[in-house]
Image (cartoon, rainbow, N blue to C red):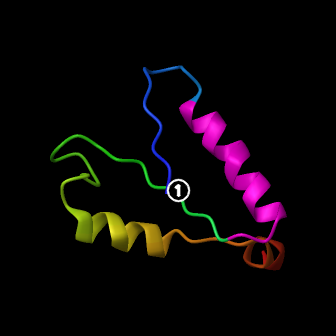
Amino acid sequence: MRWLKGRYGDGKTHTFARLMETGRNRNWVTSYVQISAPGQGVELSRLNEVYAVVISNCLCRDMILED
């Protein structure tokens, strides 16, 4: 699991998209979760929700090739 912090427009989403693409090319399982402010989505303080979203967003190369 990796964390990346930066301001709006610093390229965080782009960086993670490239890392996930590299991982899937190596047949790794990847998952992307965007942590939100309280009351606006997945909150970091609610680890059971974070874990559930990580698991539900898992992807690997074979899953993408099937689509």
Q: Is residue 66 above or below residue 14?
A: below
Residue on which the image places disc 1: 32
Mark 1 Cα shell of 10 Å, populated few (<14), some (14-19), many (≥20): some
Q: Main secondary structure of the magenta part?
A: helix
* Percent of width and height locating residue 9: 53, 20
Q: Is residue 8 above or below residue 67?
A: above
Give the image quarter of residue 17.
Answer: top right
State which quarter of the image contains the C terminus.
Answer: bottom right
Give the image quarter of residue 66.
Answer: bottom right
> Does 42 lie within the magenta span?
no
* Percent of width and height locating residue 11: 59, 26
Magenta region: 12-28
> Does 27 lie within the magenta span?
yes
Left or right, 58 with respect to 60, comes to left
* Front residue of 48 and 9: 48
Q: How many marks?
A: 1
* Percent of width and height locating residue 36: 29, 44
Q: Amino acid at mark 1?
A: Tyr
* Percent of width and height locating residue 45: 18, 54
Q: Residue at x 55, y 63 (%)?
A: 31
**Element type at marker 1?**
loop
